Amino acid sequence: MYGALDISTSGMVAQRTRMTAIAANIANANTLVDAQGNYSPYRRRAVMFAPGDPSAASQGGRSMGVHVAGVEIDGSPLVPKYEPTSPYADEDGYVMTPNINPIIEQINAMETARAYEANVVAAETTKTMMAQALRLLA
């Protein structure tokens, strides 16, 4: 029965990582330079999930749940924005800006929050069922 708690916990950890990436995307929606001050527009990050939990203690536990397989940089094209006065503008006056759509990121954040909440509810329900089973045995 503890496997059910592990599954919910792995889901919460994965969704927390996804929410962190979404927050970074929103925070960097207008970032045009890197840490060294070079023109390098921020690119959207996306969290990739995979089945199973490699950190589980038992072999059976490793096949359950979910884990973060990686955080990938979105390869979609940067968004051109007409700003002829910008020092980063090309010869036509366009600056390439991050490939982040704040509306899509907000939708992803809402979906992530709901998935996290669903895992919390599943964990709480599992704990309640385990407590009831222990009461029946006592």
Image: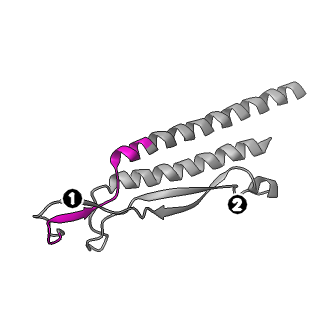
Left or right of 74: which side holds 30? left
- Start-end of magenta stretch: 90-107
Q: Amino acid at mark 2?
A: Pro
Q: CA distance from mark 1 to mark 2?
A: 43 Å
Residue 76, x across and y down, in percent: 39, 61
For disc 2, the marked residue is 54
Question: How many marks on residues?
Answer: 2
The quadrant in which residue 98 appears is: bottom left
Left or right of 97: which side holds 125? right
Q: Secondary structure at mark 1?
A: strand
Quarter occupied by the C terminus:
top right
**At 47% across and 49% down in the image, what residue appears?**
19
For disc 1, the marked residue is 81
Residue 135 covered by magenta stretch: no
Residue 25, x across and y down, in percent: 38, 55
Regarding residue 67, the answer to whether it shows in the image is yes
Residue 10, x across and y down, in percent: 65, 49
Q: Amino acid at mark 1?
A: Lys
Left or right of 62: which side holds 105? left
Q: Secondary structure at mark 2?
A: loop
The furthest residue to the right: 137
**At 69% across and 59% down in the image, what residue appears?**
55
Regarding residue 138, the answer to whether it shows in the image is no
Residue 135 - label? none
Look at the image and name its color scheme.
Answer: one colour
Q: Earlier in the sequence, mark 1 or mark 2?
A: 2
